[in-house]
Image (spheres, rainbow, N blue to C red):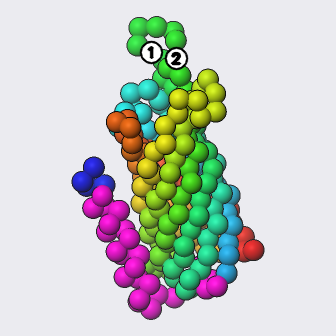
């Protein structure tokens, strides 16, 4: 957990540093909104690795360009964790999902190359009912990627912590966006 906290702090510090430099990425137009729809896939880590094989989700992201190389983000969507079979049986663990609500920053460190960091809350959705017995998790999500005017491809780590059940995912998000 200490390494993850340090990684997130470095991502935010680097994003803040690059806001003050003269990078001409021009992929985040200043004073403009961009909306993107994406598909994310990942491999569970931590406790989730014991119960699920992979996760798949969809995201909607609203991005506002503060400068041409720095933006603020708001993202939501849904992630589904596909369950494993319980060892020695033909029965699967209960499947579950997470509905994230996150905000963050995105800074371009070179033309089309960015680093980002997001934080927010994740609401677990269990197989037997929406939010029934589900927990609310703190989400911390550093990422890095490539983006142009319409496409955004990023690698990310999502950490879900809280209520003694901590897990995460390492994954890829591919999105298509357009200016509003």
Q: Residue at x 41, y 8 (%)?
A: 88
Range of residues picked out in magenta: 5-31
Q: Residue furthest left?
A: 2
Q: Nearer the viewer, residue 168 or 74?
A: 74
Label 2 CA crowd tier, 10 Å (few <14, some 14–19, many 20+): some
Q: Residue furthest top?
A: 89
Image side of residue 22 versus residue 133, left or right? left
Residue 33 appears at what percent x and percent y?
68, 76
Residue 39 appears at what percent x and percent y?
62, 50
Quadrant position of the C terminus in the picture: bottom right
Q: Residue furthest bottom?
A: 22
Q: Which mark is residue 92?
A: 2
Q: Residue at x 49, y 71 (%)?
A: 105
Please say whether residue 73 is one of the residues in the magenta stretch.
no
For residue 42, say whether it is visible.
no
Please say whether residue 22 is one of the residues in the magenta stretch.
yes
- Pointers 2 and 1 in contact (C-beta within 8 Å): yes
Q: Is residue 35 above or below residue 101?
A: below
Residue 137 appears at what percent x and percent y?
45, 45
Q: Residue at x 42, y 55 (%)?
A: 140
Label 2 – label 1 distance at C-alpha? 5 Å
Image side of residue 151 versus residue 153, left or right? right
Q: Nearer the viewer, residue 84 or 31?
A: 31
Q: Is residue 11 above or below residue 49?
A: below
Indicate the quadrant where residue 71 lies: bottom right
Residue 127 appears at what percent x and percent y?
60, 26
For residue 140, say whether it is visible.
yes
Q: Residue at x 44, y 64 (%)?
A: 117
User: To which residue does mark 1 refer?
Assistant: 86
Label 1 CA crowd tier, 10 Å (few <14, some 14–19, many 20+): few
């Amino acid at each position: 957990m200490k390494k993850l906290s340090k990684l997130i702090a470095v991502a935010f510090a680097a994003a803040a540093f690059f806001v003050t430099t003269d990078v001409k990425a021009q992929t985040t137009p200043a004073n403009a909104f961009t909306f993107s729809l994406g598909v994310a896939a990942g491999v569970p880590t931590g406790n989730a690795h014991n119960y699920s094989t992979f996760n798949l989700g969809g995201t909607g992201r609203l991005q506002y360009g503060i400068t041409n190389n720095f933006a603020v983000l708001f993202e939501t969507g849904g992630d589904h964790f596909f369950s494993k079979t319980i060892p020695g049986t033909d029965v699967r663990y209960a499947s579950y999902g997470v509905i994230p609500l996150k905000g963050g920053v995105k800074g371009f460190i070179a033309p089309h190359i960015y680093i980002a960091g997001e934080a927010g809350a994740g609401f677990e959705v269990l197989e037997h009912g929406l939010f029934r017995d589900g927990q609310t998790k703190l989400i911390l999500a550093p990422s890095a990627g490539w983006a142009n005017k319409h496409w955004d491809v990023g690698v990310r780590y999502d950490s879900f912590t809280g209520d003694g059940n901590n897990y995460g995912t390492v994954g890829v998000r591919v999105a298509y966006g357009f200016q509003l």
